Amino acid sequence: MTDFAGQCAYYASHQIFLSPRAFFILVLNMEKKFDDTVGEEVCRQEGSIYKGWTHRDYLEFWMKSIHQYSSDKAPVILVGTHSENKTEKEKMLFFRQIWKILEMKEKTLHKHLDVKRQFAVGFHDNESIEKIKRSILDIVPKLDHWGEELPQSWAMFEKFFQEKRNFKILSKAELQRFNEALPEGIKLQTDDINVMLQFFHDIRELLHFGQEFLNEVIILDVQWFADAFKNVITDENHAKEDLFHLASEWDKFNEAGELHDTLLSAIWRMNNNGYIEHKDDIMLYMEKLGLLAKLSDKKWYVPCMNKTPFCMEYFSSYHASSIICYRFDLLPASIFHRLIATCIQIPWEIFSDGDQECIYQTAAVFMYQDMQHNILLGMTQTEIQLQVFVVEGEVDVSTCHQIRENIEHILHNLSSTFEKNSEFHVAFKCKPTGFCDSKESAVISESKFIRETFLCPSCPANKKHRINTNNITKYWKQIKTSVASATSGLDLGGRSRFAKLGMATNDVLIQACRDMLEMEVPPSHIENKVKSSKIKLNQDQKDLVQKAKSSGYNIFDISLTYTLVRNICSKIPKPTKGSWGGNSMPAPGEIMVGDDIERIRLTRNNLTAHVSSASTPQTEFDDTWSMMSDICKRLETFTGKKYLDKLNYIQKLTLKEEDEDDIIEKVKMESQHEMMKEMWSDMKDIKAAVLRPESKHASNYEYYS
């Protein structure tokens, strides 16, 4: 049984405990009126988004949280307290009012309720308490998972987890060793281990996620993990007493949510619960849960601590697009927080107001990758709103469409953790003004924009106005063109198109990968860095690594560069899916730096695979060139170097036949080199299978280990 903390700063961590295999008891004070404002002292809401909330707002909040993070039909028992002075009619009206408040689209939240599960409890009311107990006994056998048969061996794993709980965190490797030591018939296969871990995760016996960067770590003590976050958002009075030597850092954290490593370490040292020892793993899990976002190696953003109010007047003078809205039936604040965290991690640069970053309690402003357009994201109780503005010039329609794709892709991805019921539909503001302001303009469903002009159906009678559909939707509607790049109108032959793609890949895109490697590891340090890591390299690659000290990274091909970037560059954001490799091109909305590195690798692989024909159709060329342009724009933001100018220069070149031959020959040589590496790798595998390890004939093909 879990009793949720009442202080509103802790609400962000409640998703950890809202299990899909649970039922809930929601307790309300019958003496309070639903439209009365909750006293600030009740949940310490000063400066938070919950300031000014009514009892009605909190009722909806808790029911939405259950629906969002548990399941869409988790049973809820309603308990009204302080009923000793209420008549039976007053009690009935109280519960009827709850049903009316929760009467939303398709009565979504009604599915959690049952008139047989609502109880009014007074002082020393033992009879009602007994009724609640009987209701619990009635609920449990009806839960979907009741009577579910589980493998007997799971009980051994549960006992193992409990015995190891004092260690707080368990490595997947140690779990594998425990499994290998079990007798045959009890031992689990790898897939079965993952299913077992998912079960214990669902009942919150532990926390475990299957993504590559989290898969190897299992958090055994869920309460300990939650307390780690609770200690970070420590009570202000305690902070002033115990952290007086870090007063300025605390003030910045308490006001804007900016958490520095020195402050984090000081807070956790006060508690001495092993948090420092496991800091890296804890922070990765907190990032996954959207509790915070990494700004740099020594700084994080904690959304629930941000008390900086948003003021639209700061941005109202700029040229702006219309406002697109993502309307949710149920919108917990954590979805917006995780959206902002993901945008930071892409990374999109945060717009600045002097020396202050423009991240607010309910809004954030980012600079898009072209460094001309700026993205304004905001949250209301039911919507996430998006608007694009420029400081100079006019807003580009196609850029707005790209931004819409990016944001919608992120929102869809957010449902992969806890937000199983976070469906949304698209709407627009009836005017380009009134961002996150319901008084200034109204929100209208996308489906209403079917006529060229129409009278606004949502504004009050004294503010009616006519809407021009194109003026609102032109920034966001689907743009379909057969040629998406600057190559329109060029009549390139298939051979010339292939050569230009080869030239762009080798001279621009692969160079960008080398630049990213150099940003993190100078060539003078690369040999020692490789030797101290666990990267497996063949002798040719090791020779190149040794030469880099004097020759730089220009001697590295894509294979070696990619291997080094993915294994030793910790500051480069990983692909959206969480792991490197694979044969599928990232989706259009997947725009992490790691996604673009994968696109470069796969584009180069595609070229070498088609070198025998050495010809590229026009449509394929246009699509690939457009993708390359987008990659260059994003990587310019990340590295600070110029790639797009070089790409455009190649695009305008008129290649002679001998130039085409030289480029294609270079691609062909790379293809043959790859085939030779694969052949040597196959030979090594054959030798390993045939020869004994101690044999003097065994391969001397060396690896760093």
Image (cartoon, rainbow, N blue to C red):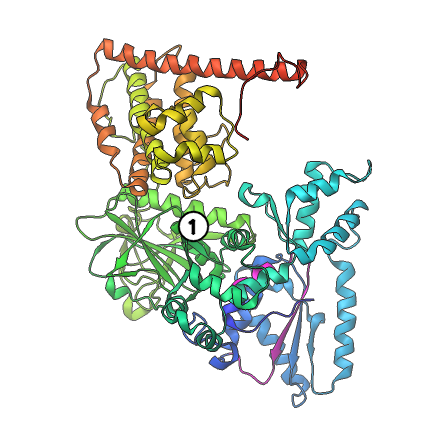
Q: Where is residue 499 in the image (x, y as percent from the top left)?
A: 30, 17
Residue 33: x and y in percent read 53, 82
Q: From this view, report whether residue 46 is shown above or below residue 425.
A: below
**Is 398 on the left or on the right of 378, as rendered?**
left
From the top left corner, tell me how far across and down residue 624 is, in percent: 34, 27
- The N terminus sits in image quarter: bottom right
Label 1 sits on a secondary structure element that is helix
Question: Residue 421, image x and y in percent?
Answer: 55, 54
Q: Is residue 359 magenta?
A: no
Q: In which quarter of the image is residue 178?
A: top right
Reply yes or no: does residue 29 show up in magenta: yes
Asked if 459 appears above or below 406 in the picture, the reply is below
Q: Which of 507 and 560 is in front in this view?
A: 560
Pick the residue in front: 488 or 359.
Answer: 359
Reading the image, the residue beneath label 1 is 342
Residue at 39% x, 19% y is 607
In the image, farthest residue toward the left: 393
Task: Tell me the magenta residue range.
Answer: 12-34
Residue 226 seen in this snapshot: yes
Q: In which quarter of the image is residue 92?
A: bottom right
Q: Quadrant of the C terminus?
A: top right
Give the residue type that dot 1 points to.
Thr
Using the image as rendered, state which of residue 460 and residue 522 is in the foreground: 522
Residue in front for this viewpoint, 65 or 349 = 349
